[in-house]
Image (cartoon, grey):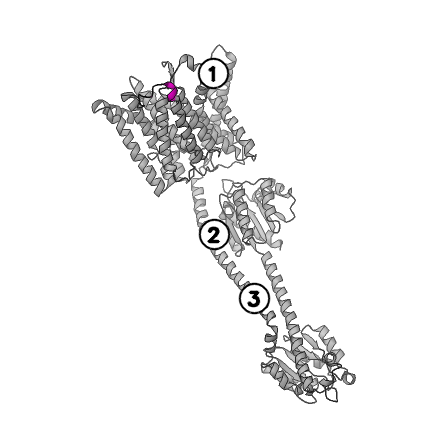
Amino acid sequence: MSSKKQTKYFKYIDIIRIIACIAILFYHLGILKGGYLAVCTFFVLSGYLSCKGALNKKKFSIFTYYKNRILKVYFPLILVVFLTIAFLSLFPSITWLNLKTETTSVLLGYNNFWQLNSNLDYFARSMHSPFLHFWYLAILIQFDFLFPFFYLALQKIGKKVGKIFPCAIPFILAVISFLCFYKIGFTENILYSYYNTFTRSFSWLVGISLAFIHTYYGSTISKNIKKKSHYKKIFWIYSSILLGLFLLVGASSLYYSLSMLAVTWMTCRMIEYATLITLTKKEASKRNNKWVSFLSKISYPIYLVQYPIIFLFQYIYWYPIVKIPIIILITLGLACVFYFCFGVKVDKKNKKIEFLKYGLSIILLITSVYGAYIFAISKNHTLEMKELEEQLAQNEKILIQKQEEYQNHMQEEASIWAQQLEDLDYEAENMEEIVVNLPLVGIGDSVMLGAVDNLYETFPNGYFDAQVSRSVWAGKEILQDLKTKELLKGPIVLNLGANGDCSTTCKSGILELSKGNEVFWLTVTNDDDVHVNSSLFALAEEHKNIHIIDWNAISKGHDEYFYADGIHLTINGRIAYTNAIKEEMIKVYTELYREKKEAMMEEHEEMQKTKISFYGNNLLLNAFVNIHEEFPDAKFNSNQNYTFELLKNDLEIAKEENTLNHKVVFILDKMTYLSNSDYKKLFELCSEKQVYVLTTSEEISNNILSLNFENVHTIRFYQEIQEHTDYLRSDGIYLTKEGNKALSLYLKEVLNSEE
């Protein structure tokens, strides 16, 4: 609003610009969640000042207008673009995959549509590009290109039809624009409404309408408000409301669209009052007013350089309380340098200042030329990245399907395991019932024969073959016959020996025939005559399936169990004899089931130790199909936007739900940076697990080793990449098909060797 011919300074117009500039900077720094609304303020100012400046001229020149806009808007933009490219080229670790295509879109003024096509979310403030904020300048350039034709058409209509039409037409178009913005953003795609030129034009059009109103009809402020002090108070009231919206209305707010309309309207009202609060040259020369004017003049350079600086600082892991002030200072410093070099006319008499100005200007220009060279020789990865994007999308679908299958498999496995434990517990609790119903086979002499009725009563599913004067020798033949008839399907009870022992060969035959069965062999009470008991105990020590029922010891001192010969059983003896067999069987089977449960638990635990949980970003997703072939039973967790907080949250959830497997493998490329402190916290979360970190650089590998976690292992895949350059795509991040296959085989080799 100021020029050489003007005698008045519109300080409060500059204040509006400063407020909007600070709001956007703080939004990009993550301080002001509604700072994005200030873009509407800039659009209103752009429309108003462009139109007002044109209306103030006696003759409007399209050539002059374009020349001024190129010098004020486009030239600084080009300079910052190429300087950014030049500076970032000094950091090989910084990956900017879209350099060629994105820079082209910025230079040609269609970056808003490019970002829309690339699905970049400005609200998420993705740090994959230093030019994410240039969508605004793309729209502004498009507005600047259209403005002369739109302005001349409106001016002509005003002269021929009536002055009300140049005021009304932009306003009506603004209403239509906002309605489209609201409808598309609310019902369809918020990014499309946000980045689209027409849907964002309502603020700019309102500014044009206001400029025509002021020129043709004057201010719309009530004539009852006469004092300049009242103007200032009302201006600051609007500013306070504006600040409140910047503080409170985030991008996810339901009032997001209406807040943009409110900011547009309040900016118009602030312009109304700002144009009535003027300062004379003398007043403008005061120090505080000079500072306001200066900050306003560097607001555009501040906007240009802030995001490249923020982008660079994402690779510097300082605490926000330290990082943010430094970013602000560097941003202000660079903006001042730009203004000094290209916006200030220095006194030629002051040679030192003049030398400094031109020296810095030459350095900036040469550096930008180098940046232009880097841009010119940079490769266009569009087709390659499109192919990768399609592959990642396909892999993501497969991964989701496999995650569902894994979850169903785990639920089924858990259900089977729970049922097995339940069955074992039931058997342990009901062991007597189980034992007495076993298909028991009993082979004995006259001692067993005397108790057969009791035995059948106790073991209703049993089969007993007992005969007077039967020796051990007969046992082999009987067992052979029973085996042939497939009757040996349960435990075997032997009561042979009272009529004499048999040879080792005979007993070996009995043992061979009873292999796979639990054998319960009763000792005899006439061992002083036959000397068989010691051989039975020796047999039990050598063979795990032989269990001795020491009837000799059990019955000692119980004369009521026997007739006068001390061998054959009375009624009481038959009962005690049967109970002795039952109790020993219960004891043995209880122990067998305990051992079985312990073995199952141990086997289950060992099986759990082989299970793996993978966590990774696109490096994992890209190689997912190959890795899944090698580890079909693993759990896969992939997120291309993984950060420390997201990883930590996923691990905590898995621990809480008891779904974090024994082996935890992190597969992350450099798009997800974790500091040593981040790794330490993640490792502490997995302190009871075996952790493996696939490293794509020697530095990360050494950093992890320096943390000294015994349960943490590094998988040094960077060594394979160094030896096989064909494993990496040209972007230096993503793996080729050969690289993905090699990665999966390398993981298999390392993880299997650790078992």
Tell me what residue is drawn at x 50 percent, y 56 percent: 407
- Left/right placement of residue 6 relative to residue 745 reads left
Kindly report the distance in space between the C-alpha atoms of the residues bearing marks 3 and 1: 86 Å
Q: Which residue is mark 3?
A: 422
Q: Does the image show residue 141?
A: no
Residue 475 placement (x, y as % from top left): 67, 84
Q: Earlier in the sequence, mark 2 or mark 3?
A: 2
Q: Please identify the quarter of the rendering in which residue 450 is found.
A: bottom right
Q: Considering the image in quadrants, where does the N terminus appear?
A: top left
- Left/right placement of residue 423 relative to residue 271 reads right
- Left/right placement of residue 449 relative to residue 412 reads right
Q: Residue furthest front?
A: 224
Q: Which residue is mark 1?
A: 287
- Labels 2 & 1 near each other (Cβ < 8 A): no
- Magenta span: 225-231
Kindly report the distance in space between the C-alpha atoms of the residues bearing marks 2 and 1: 64 Å
Assign a secondary structure to mark 1.
Answer: helix
Number of the front mark, 2 or 3 = 3
Above or below for 518 versus 96: below
Assign a secondary structure to mark 3.
Answer: helix
Above or below for 722 versus 246: below
Q: Which residue is mark 2?
A: 399
Q: Residues within 10 Å of mark 2 (few under 14, many from 20)?
A: many
Assign a secondary structure to mark 2.
Answer: helix
Between 307 and 17, the one nearer to me in the picture = 17
Q: In the rendered structure, which amino acid carries the disc numbered 1?
A: Arg
Tell me what residue is drawn at x 64 percent, y 72 percent: 589
Q: Residues within 10 Å of mark 3 (few under 14, many from 20)?
A: few
Q: Residues within 10 Å of mark 1 (few under 14, many from 20)?
A: few
